[in-house]
Amino acid sequence: MSEFELAGRRPTWADVDLDALASNFRAVRERVGAGVKVMGVVKADAYGHGARECALRLADEGAEWFGVASPEEGFALRGAGVTQPVLSFGGFWQGQAEDCLRQSIVPVVYRLDMAEALDAAARAARKVADVHVKI
């Protein structure tokens, strides 16, 4: 990019080295041991570094879970082929319980009406909903 193209912009960028990401994951895995499940947190597009690419690489390295900010981010991971459990830290919005259940997005539940909506969706689908309860 030329200096002219950078005029009026912040001349910053991030180069993401997926090999370094994988190496860091392996270091964490070695430190915590094989009996501990490791979650790759890729919310906010992996903090602007590319959630799809980071998640797929971490999945190849053995990440057991992924964490996202919203169901939409989880749906995008599913669309990219991520099959591991996905935890939505922000829960879900009204009307999203069915989609979370259908796409196996595990929401954090922090209000009774959220639990009731997820329960109703699970009963209708004849499934058991997985949740994390925020206390």
Image (tube, rainbow, N blue to C red):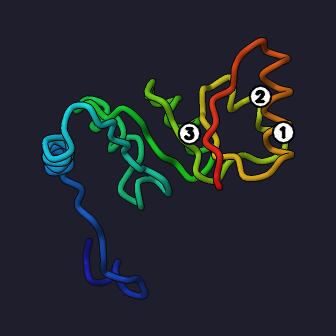
Amino acid bearing label 3: Gly
Q: Which corner quadrant of the image does residue 14 belong to? A: bottom left
Q: Which corner quadrant of the image does residue 36 belong to? A: top left
Determine contact: label 3, label 2, CB under 8 Å: no
Residue 8 percent location from the top left of the image:
43, 87
Q: How far apart are the alpha carbons under marks 3 and 2?
A: 14 Å
Q: How far apart are the alpha carbons under marks 2 and 1?
A: 7 Å
Pick the quarter of the image with the N terminus.
bottom left
Determine contact: label 2, label 1, CB under 8 Å: yes
| Upstream in sequence: badge 3 or badge 2 | 3
Badge 2 is on which residue? 98
Residue 74 circle label? 3
What residue do we see at 38% from left, 43% from top? 39
Amino acid bearing label 1: Gly
Residue 106 percent location from the top left of the image:
60, 35
Amino acid bearing label 2: Glu
Residues 3 and 51: in front is 51
Determine contact: label 3, label 1, CB under 8 Å: no
